[in-house]
Amino acid sequence: MATTQEKTPILTPIMRWFMFAMILANIAASMYPMLLPIYLTQLGASIQQVGLVFTATSLVSLLLQIFGGWVSDSIGRLRSIAIGSIGGVIGFLAVAIAPTWQWMLVAMAVSMFPGALVGPSFGAFIAENSAEEHRGKVYGFTGTIFQITGVLGPLAGGLLMGRFGFRPMMLAVCGLYGLAALLRIWMASTMKEEANATRSNDLSFGSFKTSISKMWALMVGGGVLTWILVTDGVRDVAFRLSGELQPLYLEQIGGLGVEQIGLLGSIFAIATMITPMISGRMVDKTEERYPIIIGFLFIFVAFFIFLNSAAFFGFAAAWVTFGLGVGMLNPAYQSLISKVVPQNMLGVFQGVFYSSIGLISLPAPYIGAYLWENFTPRLPFEITAGVAILSVIPIWFKFKISKQEGEKEKPGAVLEAVEPSLLLDPESGD
C-alpha cells in the first residue's frame, strides 16, 4: 500500500503566532501614516514645515535603528520586538495628544521606537525559521499575509478620522497596538527561539562596536551588498523626495478627501497581495534580480499614471500598479539579503544598512517640499519616476550572485573572507 508523505507546512507554529501579532500591530500602525501630513497642515504646518518634520524624525529613526538591530542580534528577535512594542504604545499615545505640529515632531520621534526594535527583527526572524531553498516562497507567503494590515489599516484610519477626527483615531491605534504588545510580551516570555543558543546577550559598548565594524566591512567590501547600498541610497533619496508629499498631492491637486485617501491605501495593499508569491517562486526558480527589475518597471508605470490622473479612479489605477511593483520587490530583496548576510548579523545589518542610506536621504523630504513650492508640485514625483526606471540598469548588471559567491557568502564564511580576525562571537514591518 502506497504511503503519502505529508507536506511540511510553510509556517511553523511559532511563525504563525509571530505573524498574527505582527498583523495586529501593523493594522494599528498603518492606520495613520497617510493621514499624518494632512493632520500636520491642520495643526498649522506649511508644506516645507511638513517636510522638515519628516526630515527631523528620520534622523531619530536612523540613530535608533543602528542600536535596534544590534539589540535584536544580541538578545533575540522576540525579546527585542516585545521591548519595541512597549515603546510603540507610548509613542502612539504621544502622537494622539500632541497639541501643535512642533510637539507632534517630538511625539513622532518617540513613535520611532517600534520601527527601530521591531523592524530589524522581522526579516531576520523569518530567515532564521526557514530553509534557504524555500526562503523565497516563505517571504512571498508571509508578505502576502502581511498585506492584510495595509488593507484594513488605512481604510479604518480614513473612516475614523473622517468621522471622529485624528485624535480619536490615534486612540484606537493605541488600543489595538496595545493588544499586539501584550501578545508579543507573552511570546517573548514563553516561547523559545532555537537561534538564541548562539546569541551573546552582551549589550556592552565593545560588543556594539565589534558588530558595527564587521557589518561595515561587509557593506564596503565591493560585493553584492556594496551595490545594494549604492543603488538603494540613490533610490531612497529619490523616493523620499515625494513619499511624504503624496497625501498632500492627492488632497490639494487631486481633490480627494481623507476617506478616499485611506481607501487608496487599502487598494494598494490588496494589489500588493497579488505578487509576493509570484516573486518568491521566481526567486527560488531563477534569481532575485528578475522580480526586482519587474517591480521597478511597475513603479515607473505607476508614477506615469499618477501624474496623468485627475480623478479618484485614475489614482486608484496608479495605486494598484504601485502595489503590484512593491509586492514583486519585497520578497526578492529579503531573499537576496538573507543569502549574503550572516544570520546572526541580520539585525545589525538592517540597522547599519538602512541608517546609512537614510542618512544619505535625510534632507530629501525637505528638498521635495522646496521643489513643490518653488517650481511645481509635479517635479518631486517626476524625479522619483526617473530614478525608478534608471535603477534597472545597475540591478541587472550587479545584483547577480554566482554559485561560487553564494558559497563564499554563507553565514560564517563571509567574515572569514573579509578578515579572519573578525571571527568573534557577536551576538528588526513594525
Image: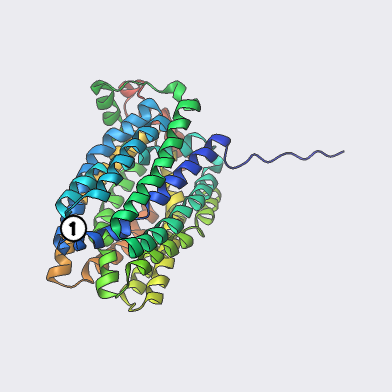
Q: Is residue 178 visible?
A: yes
Residue at image point 29% right, 58% down: 166
Residue 33 screen position, x and y as percent? 31, 55
Q: Position of residue 238 (x, y in %)?
A: 25, 59
Residue 296, by quadrant, is bottom left
Q: Is residue 307 above or below residue 188?
A: below
- The answer to whether 74 is drawn above or below residue 12 in the figure is above
Q: Quadrant of the C terminus?
A: top left
Q: Nearer the viewer, residue 153 or 132?
A: 153
Q: Which residue is mark 1?
A: 51
Residue 425 x/y as whole percent: 36, 21
Q: Position of residue 214 (x, y in %)?
A: 30, 29
Looking at numbered disc 1 in the image, what kind of residue is underneath it? Gly
Count of numbered circles on the image: 1
Quarter of the N terminus within the rendering: top right
Q: Residue at x 36, y 44 (%)?
A: 224
Question: Which residue is rendered at x = 35% and y = 78% of the image?
Answer: 311
As drawn, is 418 to the left or to the right of 379?
right
